[in-house]
Image (spheres, helix red, strand yellow):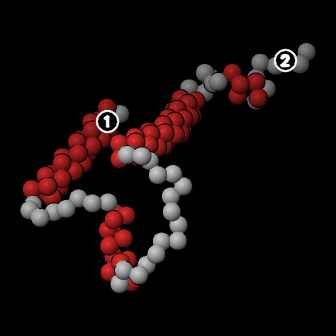
Amino acid sequence: MKMQNIKLEIIALGVIILFIAAFAAVSSQEGHEWSGADSQAEDVISDLTGGSYQPWYSSIYQPPSGEIESLLFALQAAIGSLIIGYFLGYYRGRAGLQMQEKRDPVKRAPERAAEEGEGKTDA
């Protein structure tokens, strides 16, 4: 089991190194421009329609500054990460308990033993 953990750590380290190398390669090139997908889509739409496109929907809430907008985006990402992390941990713990029950069926959870009728005697 320990060898499998070492392999996973090596794979994770390799992915991180590849990400850093790709970021360094893109950042070192001249003439690149960082912009969001919304502004790029807006440019393409205005090129295709000749600038005559009028949006039919506007935002419900417009933050007063870019800092607040970034804060709300970070808060949304944090809440989403917490939800995903909770469910990943829940299912990993559940799978671990199932594996433990398969290895040692005598030491089962008390609820399951009660459900299966263990410990009950009909005298």
- Give me the residue at 11% from left, 64% from top: 31
Which residue is drawn at the image coordinates 65% and 24% (left, top)?
109
Looking at the picture, how far across and down is residue 93, in whole percent?
A: 52, 32
Q: Is the residue marked by circle 2 packed among few (<14), some (14-19), or many (20+) residues within 10 Å?
A: few
Residue 44 location, x and y as percent?
33, 76
Q: Which mark is residue 62?
A: none
| 104 is higher (above) or lower (below) than 87 | above
Of pointers 2 and 1, the one earlier in the residue sequence: 1
Q: Vertical placement of 76 versus 52: above or below?
A: above
Other residues around mark 1 within 10 Å, as few (<14) / some (14–19) / many (≥20)? few
Label 1 secondary element: helix
Q: What is the number of the mark on residue 5? A: 1
Q: Amino acid at mark 2?
A: Thr
Q: State the image coordinates of residue 34 (x, y, percent, origin top left).
A: 23, 59
Q: Cα distance, mark 2 to mark 1? A: 45 Å
* Quadrant for the C terminus in the image: top right
Among all residues in the image, which is located at the extreme top? 123
Q: Nearer the viewer, mark 2 or mark 1?
A: 1
All told, the count of numbered labels is: 2
Residue 121 marker: 2
Whether residue 91 appears in this view of the structure is yes
Q: Is residue 74 something one can see in this rendering?
A: no
Secondary structure under the numbered disc 2 in the rendered image: loop
Q: Which residue occupies 82% across, 19% down?
A: 120
Vertical position of residue 44 compared to residue 82: above or below:
below
Q: Position of residue 107 (x, y in %)?
A: 60, 21
The residue sitting at 31% across, 36% down in the picture is 5
Tell me the kind of residue under disc 1.
Asn
Instruction: Name, please, the residue furthest toward the right.
Output: 123
Q: Is residue 47 above or below residue 55?
A: below
